[in-house]
Image: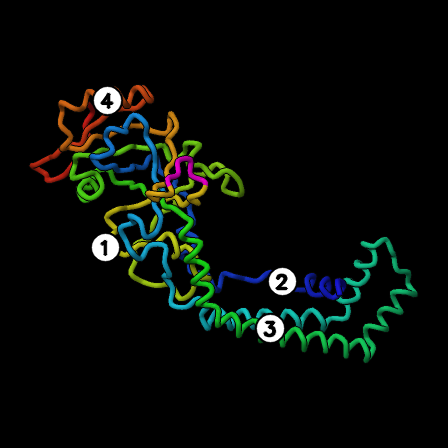
Amino acid sequence: MSIFRDIFEKSVPDFDFSGLVSPKVGEMGKPFEGNTLYKFYGENLLPMIGDPTIRFTQRGATLNDPFELTIRWKETVSKTTSEKLEIYLRSSFERAFSDDGHIMRTITLWFARKGILLNDDQIKEVSTAISSGRAKDIFSQIKDDLNKRIGEFLVNLNKLRDEFDKFLSEDMSKLGVFSTTEDINSDQMWGLYASSGKGFALEIDPYNEIFRVKKGDLKGSSLFRKVLYTDEYCDDFLSNPYFLFLVKKSKWSFEKEWRILKYLETCELKDNTTGVYRDRLPKFSIKSVIFGYNVPNNLLDKYISDVHDFDDNILVRKMKLNHIQGNLYVDDI
């Protein structure tokens, strides 16, 4: 049956997914192209500032949005998607077995790949056979069988949700999220994620080797992807797969988050008991350490010493309060 597979494959155009995919996909898939990102740490992690790590947080642990990494679409496969797939598949099979010239060319090439070059008489004989009533009956039977299989496939596709959702849920449980922000001056972020200014933030280099794509078309670009904040659900999974892991509710928009996802089993430091998975940050991956506005000045010398023991190229700064304008700003120490 390999010759029939060749007849089909060589006649079928690539499926145009553009009609199914949301315009948001292109924007959401873009890697980070800015200069710097920030990661906040609580007061309890100040003693570890000389051995900096990043944590990949899994769903159901300490992710603040309970809807993260969960189903964010109305249907697994929408009616529109199903109809477009059906039209494409049925028309493709019809096209594949209706063009005698195409079938003849495919058969000739099939023999040629096996080292058999058909002469004029053999080509004429094959062409006659293709045009015969018997051949037409065979092709018709193949089309009928394929159309039946398409119908079965579409029925199963529309029953897919429960199994598909279960599969995604299991796969998402193996992933961890490393979250950063582009906004160091957010008082909400300092309040929520840095112990109300008693913690610190790391200014990281998003293009350090640890944060770069290692292979493929985007090799060398940053792994960080921007989070979309919306209360909307997309029509189905195929229209925007990014809705699974790059979307949070609009009330979290102040975070201005950029994130990386990683399989937990690949983390450098794993504690299966506590469910904490981390990677160490290498030298030169941190541009600066920014202490919170409520970190006591008498503790700074010790923490600064720890930072420079790790990497003396790291700049040290502190957040300050501007009471007149009612905002935060970064000041050098």
Q: Position of residue 51 (x, y in %)?
A: 32, 27
Q: Which callout, 2 or 1, points to the residue nearer the camera?
A: 1
- Under circle 1, the secondary element is helix
Callout 2 amino acid? Pro
Q: Residue 94: which quarter of the image?
A: bottom right
Residue on which the image places disc 4: 304
Question: Of callouts 2 and 1, which one flags the residue occurring earlier in the amino acid sequence?
Answer: 2
Question: Of callouts 2 and 3, which one flags the residue occurring earlier in the amino acid sequence?
Answer: 2
- Under circle 2, the secondary element is loop
Residue on which the image places disc 3: 150
Callout 1 amino acid? Lys
Question: Of callouts 1 and 4, which one flags the residue occurring earlier in the amino acid sequence?
Answer: 1
Q: Pointer 2 and pointer 1: residues touching (CB < 8 Å)?
A: no
**Residue 29 located left or right of residue 43:** right
- Residue at mark 3 to residue at mark 4: CA–CA distance: 66 Å
| Residue 269 magenta-highlighted | yes
Residue on which the image places disc 2: 13
Residue on which the image places disc 1: 251
